[in-house]
Image: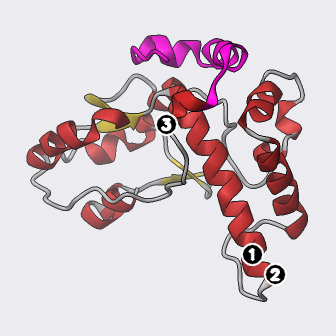
């Protein structure tokens, strides 16, 4: 999104006042470039990243509040406390919770979000994109996008979290849960564990 805003500000559309538009919403605007693209991510890696990103950000907000500093995100101290408690229980507990019917009650699922952590990437695409780039291959394929769109700005690395390689976080049970939840994404984008 940061890259799109700096290169094509007229193409950044927010739908419902709070969320990025689906590709079908952007089609008319993006037709002026003659090309549409998006990124997808291995669901196993995506879930590890989400778990750590949300947990680490909540810890940071708690730390800032404790020091009397302002916090940008609209979360309450109680909400952040609940996220941090969930985060400290570990990744396995988080994935096991996703398999429960009431998983949307998890601290990770609360707050101002337009999607669930289990929303399939396939659902965002609407089948209307010229090129799908796997995040794992971004360094290779993004150069093509820059060339086609005559744009030399680098893609920034934002919203990162600290964690080990995703495979270290899974056991047989959690791997099976994620395979079941994200089956359509795994099949559609040809991902494996």
Q: Which mark is residue 63?
A: 1
- The circle drawn on residue 165 is 3
Residue 23, percent from left and from top: 41, 37
Q: Main secondary structure of the magenta part?
A: helix
Identify the magenta region: 169-193
Q: Is label 1 or label 3 in front?
A: 3
Q: Which mark is residue 66?
A: 2
Tell me how far mark 3 sits from mark 2, CA to CA. 31 Å
Q: Is 170 a magenta residue?
A: yes
> Residue 181, which numbered label?
none
Q: Earlier in the sequence, mark 3 or mark 2?
A: 2
Q: How is the image coloured?
A: secondary structure
| Crowd class of label 3 (few under 14; some 14 to 19; many from 20; radius 10 Å) | few
Whether 2 is among the magenta residues is no
Viewer-closest of 14 and 181: 181
User: Where is residue 125 shown, x and y percent of the image?
Assistant: 44, 29
Residues at discs 2 and 1 in contact (Cβ within 8 Å): yes
Look at the image and tell me in which quarter the N terminus lies. bottom left
Q: Residue at x 79, y 21 (%)?
A: 99
Nearest the camera: 11 or 83? Answer: 83
Residue 82 position by quadrant:
bottom right
| In-image side of 63 versus 140 (left or right) | right
Quarter of the rendering containing residue 130? top left
> Residue 69, how many percent across, how many down?
72, 87
Q: Nearer the viewer, residue 73 or 27?
A: 73
Residue at 56%, 43% (x, y): give it: 49
The residue depicted at 78 percent of the width and 65 percent of the height is 75
């Amino acid at each position: 999104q940061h890259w799109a805003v700096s290169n094509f500000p007229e193409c950044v559309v927010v739908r419902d006042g709070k969320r990025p538009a689906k590709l079908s919403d952007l089609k008319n605007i993006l037709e002026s470039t003659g090309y549409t693209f998006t990124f997808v991510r291995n669901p196993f890696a995506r879930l590890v990243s989400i778990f750590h990103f949300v947990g680490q950000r909540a810890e940071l907000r708690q730390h800032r509040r404790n020091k009397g500093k302002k916090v940008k995100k609209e979360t309450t101290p109680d909400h952040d406390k609940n996220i941090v408690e969930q985060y400290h229980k570990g990744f396995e507990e988080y994935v096991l919770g996703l398999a429960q019917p009431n998983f949307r009650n998890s601290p990770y699922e609360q707050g101002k979000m337009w999607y669930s952590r289990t929303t399939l990437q396939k659902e965002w695409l609407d089948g209307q994109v010229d090129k799908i780039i796997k995040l794992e291959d971004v360094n290779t394929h993004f150069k093509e996008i820059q060339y086609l769109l005559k744009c030399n700005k680098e893609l920034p690395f934002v919203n990162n979290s600290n964690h080990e390689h995703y495979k270290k976080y899974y056991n047989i049970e959690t791997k099976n849960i994620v395979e079941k939840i994200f089956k359509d994404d795994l099949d559609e984008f040809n991902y494996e564990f």
